[in-house]
Amino acid sequence: MRPICPILFMLVLATASVGAERKKVVIPFDFTSKFDQGRYGQQVGELVWKKLEREGGFVIPESMLDVRDTVTSQGLIISPDMALEKMKRIVIKDFGADVAIWGSVERVPGNAWDVYDLKIRCIDFTTGPKPVVLYKVDARTKTVSEIPHVYVKAMLDGLYGRTPGGPVPVDPLIEKNWKNNPNLIRGGDFQRGRDGVPEGWDSRGGQKREPLGNLVRWVTESGNPSNRVIRLTFDKALGDTFGVMYYSDYFPIEEGATYRFQCRWRTDGPEAKVFIKGYDEVASEYKDKNNGSSNRSAKAYVPEGVQRRECYRSQQNLKGPKNQWNTQTQDFTPKHTKYTPRWGRVMLYGFLGAGSVEFDDVVVKQIVPPSPGHRDKLRRHSLESGVTLKEMEENRKRGQQAGEDKKNGTP
Protein backbone atom coordinates (compact mmCIF):
# COMPACT_ATOMS: atom_id res chain seq x y z
CA MET A 1 0.00 0.00 0.00
CA ARG A 2 1.36 3.40 -0.97
CA PRO A 3 2.14 5.57 2.10
CA ILE A 4 0.12 8.75 2.65
CA CYS A 5 2.04 11.78 1.48
CA PRO A 6 2.53 14.19 4.44
CA ILE A 7 2.11 17.29 2.29
CA LEU A 8 -1.11 15.88 0.79
CA PHE A 9 -2.51 15.17 4.26
CA MET A 10 -1.57 18.68 5.42
CA LEU A 11 -3.16 20.41 2.43
CA VAL A 12 -6.37 18.38 2.68
CA LEU A 13 -6.72 19.41 6.33
CA ALA A 14 -5.89 23.01 5.52
CA THR A 15 -8.64 23.27 2.93
CA ALA A 16 -11.34 21.06 4.41
CA SER A 17 -12.35 23.50 7.15
CA VAL A 18 -13.00 26.34 4.72
CA GLY A 19 -15.96 24.50 3.16
CA ALA A 20 -17.74 26.31 0.36
CA GLU A 21 -15.17 29.10 0.43
CA ARG A 22 -12.28 26.65 -0.01
CA LYS A 23 -9.16 28.26 -1.36
CA LYS A 24 -7.38 26.57 -4.23
CA VAL A 25 -4.17 24.72 -3.46
CA VAL A 26 -1.15 25.81 -5.51
CA ILE A 27 2.06 23.74 -5.67
CA PRO A 28 5.18 25.53 -6.95
CA PHE A 29 7.84 23.02 -8.03
CA ASP A 30 11.57 23.55 -8.36
CA PHE A 31 12.45 24.36 -11.95
CA THR A 32 14.87 22.07 -13.74
CA SER A 33 18.34 23.47 -14.48
CA LYS A 34 20.61 20.75 -15.84
CA PHE A 35 23.54 23.12 -16.42
CA ASP A 36 24.19 23.41 -12.64
CA GLN A 37 22.58 20.21 -11.30
CA GLY A 38 19.38 22.01 -10.32
CA ARG A 39 20.77 24.76 -8.07
CA TYR A 40 19.43 27.73 -10.04
CA GLY A 41 16.15 25.91 -10.67
CA GLN A 42 15.68 25.61 -6.91
CA GLN A 43 16.25 29.36 -6.56
CA VAL A 44 13.49 30.04 -9.08
CA GLY A 45 11.16 27.65 -7.23
CA GLU A 46 11.89 29.44 -3.94
CA LEU A 47 11.28 32.79 -5.64
CA VAL A 48 7.84 31.70 -6.82
CA TRP A 49 6.93 30.25 -3.39
CA LYS A 50 7.95 33.46 -1.58
CA LYS A 51 5.88 35.61 -3.94
CA LEU A 52 2.84 33.36 -3.41
CA GLU A 53 3.31 33.56 0.36
CA ARG A 54 3.56 37.35 0.21
CA GLU A 55 0.52 37.89 -2.01
CA GLY A 56 -1.71 35.27 -0.35
CA GLY A 57 -5.07 34.11 -1.68
CA PHE A 58 -4.09 30.44 -2.10
CA VAL A 59 -3.13 27.49 0.09
CA ILE A 60 0.54 26.67 -0.46
CA PRO A 61 2.99 24.23 1.19
CA GLU A 62 4.72 25.32 4.39
CA SER A 63 8.02 25.49 2.50
CA MET A 64 9.67 24.24 -0.67
CA LEU A 65 11.36 21.56 1.44
CA ASP A 66 7.96 19.89 1.82
CA VAL A 67 7.55 19.81 -1.97
CA ARG A 68 11.06 18.44 -2.46
CA ASP A 69 10.54 15.75 0.18
CA THR A 70 7.41 14.51 -1.61
CA VAL A 71 9.00 14.63 -5.07
CA THR A 72 11.97 12.63 -3.80
CA SER A 73 10.01 10.09 -1.73
CA GLN A 74 7.55 9.39 -4.57
CA GLY A 75 10.27 9.27 -7.24
CA LEU A 76 8.60 11.99 -9.31
CA ILE A 77 10.24 13.58 -12.35
CA ILE A 78 8.84 17.01 -13.23
CA SER A 79 9.54 18.44 -16.69
CA PRO A 80 7.96 21.38 -18.57
CA ASP A 81 7.55 19.14 -21.62
CA MET A 82 5.74 16.27 -19.86
CA ALA A 83 2.20 15.28 -20.88
CA LEU A 84 -0.46 17.27 -19.03
CA GLU A 85 -2.38 14.12 -18.13
CA LYS A 86 0.67 12.79 -16.29
CA MET A 87 1.17 16.10 -14.53
CA LYS A 88 -2.52 16.15 -13.60
CA ARG A 89 -2.18 12.77 -11.85
CA ILE A 90 0.81 14.05 -9.88
CA VAL A 91 -0.90 17.29 -8.86
CA ILE A 92 -4.18 15.68 -7.80
CA LYS A 93 -3.06 12.26 -6.54
CA ASP A 94 0.30 13.03 -4.96
CA PHE A 95 -0.38 16.56 -3.70
CA GLY A 96 -4.17 16.89 -3.46
CA ALA A 97 -3.75 20.24 -5.22
CA ASP A 98 -5.51 22.27 -7.91
CA VAL A 99 -2.81 24.33 -9.62
CA ALA A 100 0.82 23.56 -10.44
CA ILE A 101 3.65 25.93 -11.33
CA TRP A 102 6.76 24.38 -12.86
CA GLY A 103 9.28 24.87 -15.62
CA SER A 104 12.96 24.96 -16.57
CA VAL A 105 15.77 27.47 -16.82
CA GLU A 106 18.87 26.55 -18.83
CA ARG A 107 21.91 28.62 -19.71
CA VAL A 108 22.37 29.13 -23.45
CA PRO A 109 25.83 27.89 -24.58
CA GLY A 110 28.03 30.44 -26.28
CA ASN A 111 26.14 33.44 -24.86
CA ALA A 112 26.61 35.82 -21.96
CA TRP A 113 26.10 34.39 -18.50
CA ASP A 114 22.63 35.94 -18.07
CA VAL A 115 21.10 34.55 -21.27
CA TYR A 116 18.74 31.69 -20.42
CA ASP A 117 16.12 29.57 -22.11
CA LEU A 118 13.15 29.82 -19.77
CA LYS A 119 9.98 27.73 -19.67
CA ILE A 120 7.13 28.40 -17.23
CA ARG A 121 3.89 26.46 -16.88
CA CYS A 122 1.03 27.55 -14.59
CA ILE A 123 -1.98 25.26 -15.08
CA ASP A 124 -5.22 24.63 -13.19
CA PHE A 125 -6.11 20.93 -13.32
CA THR A 126 -9.43 21.00 -11.44
CA THR A 127 -11.64 23.42 -13.37
CA GLY A 128 -13.23 20.82 -15.64
CA PRO A 129 -12.44 17.92 -17.97
CA LYS A 130 -9.57 19.81 -19.55
CA PRO A 131 -6.73 21.61 -17.76
CA VAL A 132 -6.85 25.40 -17.99
CA VAL A 133 -3.59 27.08 -18.94
CA LEU A 134 -3.29 30.17 -16.75
CA TYR A 135 0.16 31.04 -18.07
CA LYS A 136 2.65 29.41 -20.42
CA VAL A 137 5.82 30.84 -21.88
CA ASP A 138 8.93 29.66 -23.71
CA ALA A 139 11.37 32.56 -23.87
CA ARG A 140 15.04 33.45 -24.14
CA THR A 141 16.10 36.11 -21.65
CA LYS A 142 18.45 38.97 -22.41
CA THR A 143 19.10 39.73 -18.75
CA VAL A 144 18.65 37.52 -15.71
CA SER A 145 16.42 40.15 -14.06
CA GLU A 146 13.74 39.40 -16.66
CA ILE A 147 12.95 36.11 -14.90
CA PRO A 148 11.46 37.62 -11.70
CA HIS A 149 10.46 41.04 -13.01
CA VAL A 150 8.92 40.10 -16.34
CA TYR A 151 8.04 36.41 -16.61
CA VAL A 152 7.30 35.41 -13.00
CA LYS A 153 5.36 38.67 -12.61
CA ALA A 154 3.30 37.87 -15.73
CA MET A 155 2.71 34.33 -14.43
CA LEU A 156 1.33 35.71 -11.16
CA ASP A 157 -0.98 38.03 -13.10
CA GLY A 158 -2.31 34.99 -14.96
CA LEU A 159 -2.71 32.98 -11.75
CA TYR A 160 -4.59 35.75 -9.96
CA GLY A 161 -6.65 36.62 -13.04
CA ARG A 162 -5.75 40.28 -12.90
CA THR A 163 -4.76 42.95 -15.34
CA PRO A 164 -0.96 42.87 -15.77
CA GLY A 165 0.55 44.86 -12.94
CA GLY A 166 -2.80 45.20 -11.17
CA PRO A 167 -3.50 44.63 -7.47
CA VAL A 168 -4.18 41.22 -5.92
CA PRO A 169 -7.95 40.55 -5.88
CA VAL A 170 -9.60 41.05 -2.51
CA ASP A 171 -10.14 37.80 -0.59
CA PRO A 172 -13.67 38.01 0.92
CA LEU A 173 -12.88 35.55 3.73
CA ILE A 174 -9.82 37.54 4.81
CA GLU A 175 -11.74 40.80 4.71
CA LYS A 176 -14.53 39.24 6.78
CA ASN A 177 -12.00 38.14 9.42
CA TRP A 178 -10.37 41.57 9.38
CA LYS A 179 -13.74 43.17 10.06
CA ASN A 180 -15.03 40.74 12.71
CA ASN A 181 -12.04 39.29 14.59
CA PRO A 182 -10.96 40.93 17.87
CA ASN A 183 -8.06 43.34 18.16
CA LEU A 184 -5.23 41.54 19.98
CA ILE A 185 -3.77 44.85 21.16
CA ARG A 186 -5.37 45.85 24.43
CA GLY A 187 -5.76 49.62 24.54
CA GLY A 188 -4.76 50.13 20.92
CA ASP A 189 -6.73 53.37 20.75
CA PHE A 190 -4.88 54.81 23.81
CA GLN A 191 -8.11 56.14 25.28
CA ARG A 192 -7.88 54.54 28.71
CA GLY A 193 -5.20 54.31 31.36
CA ARG A 194 -4.06 55.77 34.66
CA ASP A 195 -1.07 57.39 36.32
CA GLY A 196 0.14 58.64 32.95
CA VAL A 197 0.30 55.15 31.41
CA PRO A 198 -2.14 53.92 28.70
CA GLU A 199 -3.91 50.61 29.29
CA GLY A 200 -2.18 47.66 27.60
CA TRP A 201 1.17 49.44 27.14
CA ASP A 202 4.48 49.65 28.97
CA SER A 203 5.04 52.12 31.81
CA ARG A 204 8.54 52.87 30.49
CA GLY A 205 10.00 53.76 27.11
CA GLY A 206 13.18 54.57 25.22
CA GLN A 207 16.51 52.78 25.09
CA LYS A 208 17.12 53.34 28.82
CA ARG A 209 13.60 52.30 29.83
CA GLU A 210 12.72 55.59 31.54
CA PRO A 211 9.25 56.41 32.96
CA LEU A 212 6.73 57.99 30.60
CA GLY A 213 6.48 61.77 30.41
CA ASN A 214 9.72 62.71 28.67
CA LEU A 215 10.75 60.79 25.55
CA VAL A 216 7.46 58.89 25.45
CA ARG A 217 4.26 60.70 26.41
CA TRP A 218 0.61 59.71 26.60
CA VAL A 219 -1.03 62.98 25.55
CA THR A 220 -4.14 64.60 24.15
CA GLU A 221 -4.04 65.03 20.39
CA SER A 222 -3.38 68.58 19.29
CA GLY A 223 -6.62 70.13 18.04
CA ASN A 224 -8.71 67.14 19.14
CA PRO A 225 -9.11 67.15 22.93
CA SER A 226 -11.38 64.10 22.91
CA ASN A 227 -8.63 61.84 21.53
CA ARG A 228 -5.40 60.62 23.12
CA VAL A 229 -2.23 59.42 21.34
CA ILE A 230 1.32 58.29 22.02
CA ARG A 231 3.98 60.87 21.20
CA LEU A 232 7.71 60.13 20.87
CA THR A 233 9.80 63.32 21.15
CA PHE A 234 13.61 63.47 20.85
CA ASP A 235 16.55 65.60 19.75
CA LYS A 236 18.83 64.97 16.77
CA ALA A 237 21.60 63.37 18.85
CA LEU A 238 19.22 60.68 20.09
CA GLY A 239 17.31 60.38 16.81
CA ASP A 240 20.48 59.76 14.81
CA THR A 241 21.75 57.09 17.22
CA PHE A 242 19.37 54.96 19.29
CA GLY A 243 16.03 56.55 18.44
CA VAL A 244 13.06 56.09 20.80
CA MET A 245 11.01 52.90 21.18
CA TYR A 246 7.81 52.05 23.01
CA TYR A 247 6.28 48.59 23.60
CA SER A 248 2.80 47.18 23.94
CA ASP A 249 2.05 44.40 26.40
CA TYR A 250 2.39 40.80 25.16
CA PHE A 251 -0.49 39.22 23.25
CA PRO A 252 -0.97 35.58 22.12
CA ILE A 253 -0.11 34.57 18.56
CA GLU A 254 -0.07 31.30 16.60
CA GLU A 255 2.83 30.30 14.40
CA GLY A 256 1.86 30.00 10.74
CA ALA A 257 -1.25 32.18 11.09
CA THR A 258 -1.47 35.39 9.08
CA TYR A 259 -2.10 38.64 10.92
CA ARG A 260 -2.85 42.16 9.75
CA PHE A 261 -1.30 45.17 11.44
CA GLN A 262 -2.71 48.67 11.14
CA CYS A 263 -2.05 52.01 12.81
CA ARG A 264 -2.35 55.74 12.25
CA TRP A 265 0.80 57.82 12.54
CA ARG A 266 2.22 61.22 11.78
CA THR A 267 5.58 62.96 12.05
CA ASP A 268 6.85 66.51 11.95
CA GLY A 269 10.28 65.40 10.71
CA PRO A 270 11.76 62.14 12.04
CA GLU A 271 11.36 58.73 10.41
CA ALA A 272 8.98 56.12 11.85
CA LYS A 273 8.88 52.34 11.92
CA VAL A 274 6.88 49.65 13.68
CA PHE A 275 8.22 46.23 14.63
CA ILE A 276 5.93 43.32 15.52
CA LYS A 277 8.09 40.90 17.49
CA GLY A 278 7.35 37.23 18.20
CA TYR A 279 8.58 35.37 21.29
CA ASP A 280 8.95 31.81 22.51
CA GLU A 281 9.70 30.54 26.00
CA VAL A 282 13.13 28.93 26.16
CA ALA A 283 15.14 27.38 28.98
CA SER A 284 17.45 29.78 30.78
CA GLU A 285 19.63 29.96 33.85
CA TYR A 286 17.50 32.90 34.95
CA LYS A 287 13.95 34.06 34.35
CA ASP A 288 12.15 37.36 34.62
CA LYS A 289 9.80 36.93 37.57
CA ASN A 290 7.62 39.74 36.20
CA ASN A 291 7.32 37.72 32.94
CA GLY A 292 6.55 40.69 30.73
CA SER A 293 4.84 42.94 33.26
CA SER A 294 5.25 46.68 32.80
CA ASN A 295 6.36 47.00 36.43
CA ARG A 296 10.04 46.10 36.65
CA SER A 297 12.78 46.36 39.26
CA ALA A 298 16.53 46.05 39.24
CA LYS A 299 16.33 42.62 40.93
CA ALA A 300 13.56 41.06 38.88
CA TYR A 301 15.30 37.78 38.04
CA VAL A 302 15.22 34.40 39.74
CA PRO A 303 17.40 31.39 38.83
CA GLU A 304 16.58 28.25 36.84
CA GLY A 305 13.52 28.86 34.74
CA VAL A 306 12.40 29.92 31.30
CA GLN A 307 12.35 33.30 29.61
CA ARG A 308 10.74 34.79 26.56
CA ARG A 309 13.16 35.13 23.67
CA GLU A 310 12.52 37.03 20.45
CA CYS A 311 12.41 34.61 17.51
CA TYR A 312 10.45 36.54 14.88
CA ARG A 313 10.25 40.13 13.69
CA SER A 314 8.06 41.93 11.14
CA GLN A 315 9.49 45.31 10.19
CA GLN A 316 6.94 47.83 8.94
CA ASN A 317 8.46 50.87 7.23
CA LEU A 318 6.09 53.83 7.52
CA LYS A 319 6.06 56.17 4.54
CA GLY A 320 3.81 59.18 4.10
CA PRO A 321 3.61 63.01 4.06
CA LYS A 322 4.74 64.95 7.12
CA ASN A 323 2.43 66.82 9.49
CA GLN A 324 -0.66 64.78 8.65
CA TRP A 325 -2.14 61.47 9.76
CA ASN A 326 -1.15 58.50 7.60
CA THR A 327 -2.41 54.91 7.81
CA GLN A 328 -0.10 51.88 7.70
CA THR A 329 -1.58 48.44 6.88
CA GLN A 330 0.53 45.31 6.35
CA ASP A 331 0.10 41.55 6.79
CA PHE A 332 2.65 39.26 8.46
CA THR A 333 3.02 35.55 9.31
CA PRO A 334 5.08 34.62 12.41
CA LYS A 335 7.26 31.53 11.90
CA HIS A 336 10.65 30.18 12.87
CA THR A 337 12.51 26.97 11.98
CA LYS A 338 13.68 26.22 15.53
CA TYR A 339 11.41 28.05 17.97
CA THR A 340 7.63 28.56 18.04
CA PRO A 341 6.42 32.18 18.26
CA ARG A 342 3.68 32.14 20.95
CA TRP A 343 3.46 35.77 22.04
CA GLY A 344 3.78 39.04 20.19
CA ARG A 345 4.53 42.66 21.06
CA VAL A 346 4.27 45.82 19.01
CA MET A 347 7.23 48.21 19.18
CA LEU A 348 6.61 51.79 18.03
CA TYR A 349 9.82 53.48 16.91
CA GLY A 350 10.94 56.98 15.94
CA PHE A 351 14.44 57.81 14.69
CA LEU A 352 16.64 59.92 12.38
CA GLY A 353 16.52 63.64 13.05
CA ALA A 354 14.75 65.66 15.72
CA GLY A 355 11.06 66.21 16.43
CA SER A 356 7.98 64.18 17.29
CA VAL A 357 6.27 61.04 15.96
CA GLU A 358 2.71 60.23 17.06
CA PHE A 359 0.83 56.92 16.93
CA ASP A 360 -2.85 56.05 17.34
CA ASP A 361 -5.37 53.25 16.68
CA VAL A 362 -2.94 50.30 16.76
CA VAL A 363 -4.60 47.08 15.59
CA VAL A 364 -3.41 43.48 15.18
CA LYS A 365 -5.96 40.88 14.06
CA GLN A 366 -5.65 37.29 12.88
CA ILE A 367 -6.99 37.11 9.34
CA VAL A 368 -5.94 33.57 8.31
CA PRO A 369 -5.60 30.74 10.88
CA PRO A 370 -2.63 28.34 10.69
CA SER A 371 -3.08 25.18 8.68
CA PRO A 372 -3.76 22.12 10.89
CA GLY A 373 -0.61 20.42 9.64
CA HIS A 374 1.61 23.33 10.65
CA ARG A 375 1.59 22.48 14.35
CA ASP A 376 2.58 18.86 13.70
CA LYS A 377 5.49 19.34 11.33
CA LEU A 378 8.97 18.26 12.36
CA ARG A 379 11.06 21.29 13.25
CA ARG A 380 14.16 21.92 11.17
CA HIS A 381 17.24 23.69 12.45
CA SER A 382 17.37 25.75 9.27
CA LEU A 383 15.39 26.11 6.06
CA GLU A 384 18.68 25.44 4.27
CA SER A 385 18.77 21.91 5.72
CA GLY A 386 16.42 18.97 5.74
CA VAL A 387 17.74 17.83 9.13
CA THR A 388 15.11 18.12 11.86
CA LEU A 389 15.71 19.11 15.47
CA LYS A 390 14.71 15.61 16.55
CA GLU A 391 17.34 14.10 14.27
CA MET A 392 19.95 16.54 15.58
CA GLU A 393 19.16 15.56 19.17
CA GLU A 394 19.35 11.84 18.30
CA ASN A 395 22.70 12.38 16.56
CA ARG A 396 23.97 14.28 19.61
CA LYS A 397 22.94 11.45 21.93
CA ARG A 398 24.56 8.83 19.68
CA GLY A 399 27.77 10.83 19.61
CA GLN A 400 27.72 11.24 23.36
CA GLN A 401 27.12 7.51 23.87
CA ALA A 402 29.90 6.63 21.44
CA GLY A 403 32.28 8.85 23.41
CA GLU A 404 31.31 7.20 26.69
CA ASP A 405 31.69 3.72 25.16
CA LYS A 406 35.16 4.61 23.89
CA LYS A 407 36.13 5.99 27.29
CA ASN A 408 34.90 2.86 29.06
CA GLY A 409 36.42 0.48 26.50
CA THR A 410 33.04 -0.81 25.39
CA PRO A 411 33.21 -2.28 21.84
Image: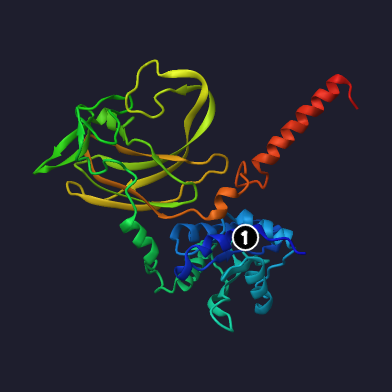
Residue marked by disc 1: 9
**Residue type pointed to by label 1:** Phe
Task: Locate residue 159 relative to residue 402 in the image: left or right.
Answer: left
User: Depth check: 280 or 358 in front?
Assistant: 280
Percent position (x, y) of residue 216? Answer: 24, 31
Percent position (x, y) of residue 6? Answer: 65, 57
Tell me which corner region of the image, top left, top right, bottom left or bottom right, holds residue 188. top left
Above or below 357: residue 330: below
Considering every residue shown, the one lying at the far top of the view is 299
Above or below 384: residue 247: above
Secondary structure, mark 1, is: helix
The answer, for residue 356, to whether it is visible in the render is no
Q: How many marks?
A: 1
Task: Locate residue 204 relative to residue 84 in the image: left or right.
Answer: left
Give me the residue at 39% from left, 64% from top.
173
User: Depth check: 248 or 150 in front?
Assistant: 248
- Point out the image quarter for the N terminus: bottom right
Give me the residue at 19% from left, 40% from top.
191
User: Depth check: 255 or 67 in front?
Assistant: 255
Considering every residue shown, the one lying at the far right of the view is 411
| Few, some or many residues within 10 Å of mark 1 (<14, 14–19, 20+) | some
Looking at the image, what colour scheme do you see? rainbow
Above or below 353: residue 170: below
Task: Locate residue 365 relative to residue 11 in the image: left or right.
Answer: left
Give me the residue at 77% from left, 33% from top.
398
Percent position (x, y) of residue 253? Answer: 43, 44
The answer, for residue 398, to whether it is visible in the render is yes
Percent position (x, y) of residue 41? Answer: 63, 60
- Point out the image quarter for the C terminus: top right
